[in-house]
Image: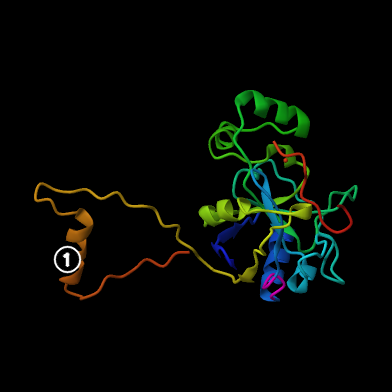
Amino acid sequence: MKTTMGTMVLKLYNETPLHRDNFINNVKSKQYDSVLFHRVIKSFMIQGGDPTSKTANSTAMLGSGDIPGVARIPAEFNPALTHKKGALAAARDGNPEKASSNCQFYIVQGKTFTDADIDRMQQYNGWKYTTEQREAFKTIGGTPHLDNNYTVYGELVSGMEVLDAIAGVKVGQADRPAVDVRILETKLLKKFKVKKEKKKHKDDDGEDDDDKNEKHEKHSKKGEVKKEKSFPQQENAPKADTEK
């Protein structure tokens, strides 16, 4: 997902096939290309996907758009898939079935929580969090009060700094960014390898390991290196369609 503030890579969950397939179809049909992140709340989430935002002027009220002729997506709540930071989830209106918008989504920024906070959230949403899930809410943060209420169907695997940058922009009426933040292009990747930061180590000769490796690679018999291919506490809930 290439935006005016950088690129993010999202992984879709196979445990939520209806939402996965809907998102894939929207990417293939270019539904997300040129839409805005029209609702941004720091320490909560960034929301986009409203098709009417593509050509909206600066005073337009956004958040009620959908794709004509496509039904809402039935809820797919899964206790294993939580609103941790970076979670990709579906916005929705106030329909009793808690079915999702067919196009609007949000990415969680959230905030960190204490064990006492998480205990209260469990009573609120009816879920029992694992040790790993609790640790995520305590360290990277999230929006656990949305669990069992909005469908999480993916997560950010690259571009967390872009999420933070977008979440930090100045906003105006209805939490719309003062300067448009636009999705320029979305495309599908079959595989993506997350880059891990390497720590350099200097040997006794003062030369970095990476430098030595580079020299070794340059003098390898094959002459080139083969690269591995691999690929709310905010109370305002993400809304779409008729809910404002």
Q: Is residue 148 magenta?
A: no
Q: Horizontally, is 200 left or right of 87 in the view?
A: left
> How far across and down, in percent of the image, does residue 44 sit?
67, 45
Q: Horizontally, is 157 left or right of 170 in the view?
A: left
> Residue pushed farthest top?
116
The vertical placement of 43 against 120, above or below, is below
Badge 1 amino acid: Lys
Residue at horizontal 50 percent and vertical 65 percent from the top: 191
Residue at horizontal 76 percent and vertical 74 percent from the top: 55
> How far across and down, in percent of the image, does residue 243 sit?
87, 53
Segment tinted magenta in the rendering: 30-34
Colouring method of the image? rainbow
Neighbourhood count class around disc 1 (C-alpha, 10 Å): few under 14, some 14–19, many 20 upward: few
User: Which quadrant of the structure image shows residue 207?
Assistant: bottom left
> Residue pushed farthest left?
205
The vertical placement of 205 against 142, above or below, is below
> How far across and down, in percent of the image, does residue 101 sit?
80, 59
Residue under pointer 1: 215
Label 1 secondary element:
helix
Residue at horizontal 76 percent and vertical 64 percent from the top: 103
User: Which quadrant of the structure image shows residue 210?
Assistant: bottom left
Considering depth in this image, is 236 or 227 the residue closer to the camera? 236
The vertical placement of 110 against 226, above or below, is above
